[in-house]
Image (tube, rainbow, N blue to C red):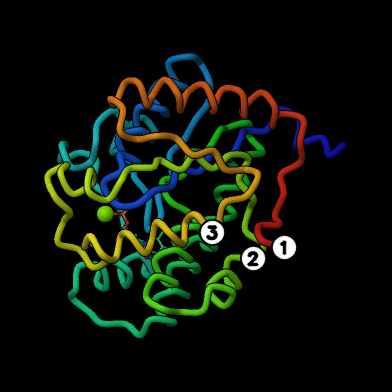
Amino acid sequence: RILNNLGRGALIVIEGCDRAGKSTQCMKLVDRLEDQGIKARLLKFPGMFRSPSGSRIGQHPDMSFAYQPDRSTSIGQMINAYLTNAKDIEDHAIHLLFSANRWEAMTHLKSLLIAGTTVIIDRYAYSGVAFSAAKGLDLKWCKQPDVGLVTPDLVLFLDLPVEEAEKRGGFGGERYETKAFQKKVRDIFMDLRDRSWKILDARVSIDELHARVLEEVMRTIENSKALQIREDLWK
Ligand code: NYM
Ligand code: MG
């Protein structure tokens, strides 16, 4: 048994289509874990959320000037320019940039897990593949750049019918935020399910969903403690 893996943090990924409530749930989850004395941090792809005061994040970024999604690495900036339609990038090239944005966070991610901090990630390689394959790129090709990333201990897919998502104030103005496209994305997400996945019905209230998320996460944190950190996603 590798010593520094004892009592490691768990890697929890929250996935779903746009407007499913991922960011809200991620923030409520991190707050709740910290309240219970469990070390927890939130990462986000693309980019990550960072509060001026440190790790603690209490509100949805859309509702607070203090917590904006940070796409600030040089790769994050290219991705941001693409998503906001400021720049066109060829489909394969932008796919590789999204993947590179995950790889550049791996050293930091592993050091958090080793230090016993549970890491919650708002989107991961599953989003990477789902959005690119929905444009028509080959699914197998799409998975290759993310092969060997740290494998999540749990993937929670917040499932919300696209019609419901649309009712939630509509989609934003970013690339990909249309009903027809989101439907394709969901179909591909379903093809990516594996044994680490748990699908949660996201039509329930924020608090009800939070309770379900927390239950799954607490169990996973317990079960992951004695397991090695695995860097074998899709291997
Ligand atoms: N997205 C996200 C991708 O196309 N590929 C990826 O690898 C990731 C992580 O970026 N519509 C897309 C999905 C979203 C968009 O994400 C921005 P968010 O969570 O809305 O900031
Ligand atoms: Mg979005």
For label 1, the crowd category at 10 Å Cα-Cα, with few meaning under 14, some 14 to 19 and many 20 or more, is: few
Instruction: Calculate the distance from the C-alpha at mark 2 to the C-alpha at mark 1.
Output: 6 Å
Ligand 1 lies under 8 Å from the Cβ of mark 1: no
Q: Residue 235 has which mark?
A: 1
The kind of residue tagged 2 is Val
The kind of residue tagged 3 is Asp
At mark 1, the secondary structure is loop
Ligand 1 lies under 8 Å from the Cβ of mark 2: no
Look at the numbered discs 2 and 1 and tell me whether their residues touch, using CB distance below 8 Å: yes
Looking at the image, tell me whether mark 2 or mark 1 is earlier in sequence order.
2
The residue indicated by pointer 3 is 191
Q: Which residue is outermost to the left?
A: 169
Q: Is residue 168 above or below residue 69?
A: above
- Residue pictured at 68% horizontal, 33% vertical: 8
For discs 3 and 2, the disc positioned in front in the rendered view: 3
Front-most of residues 139 and 224: 139
Expressed as whole percent of the image width and height from the top left, the position of residue 86 reads 18, 75
Expressed as whole percent of the image width and height from the top left, the position of residue 40 reads 49, 30
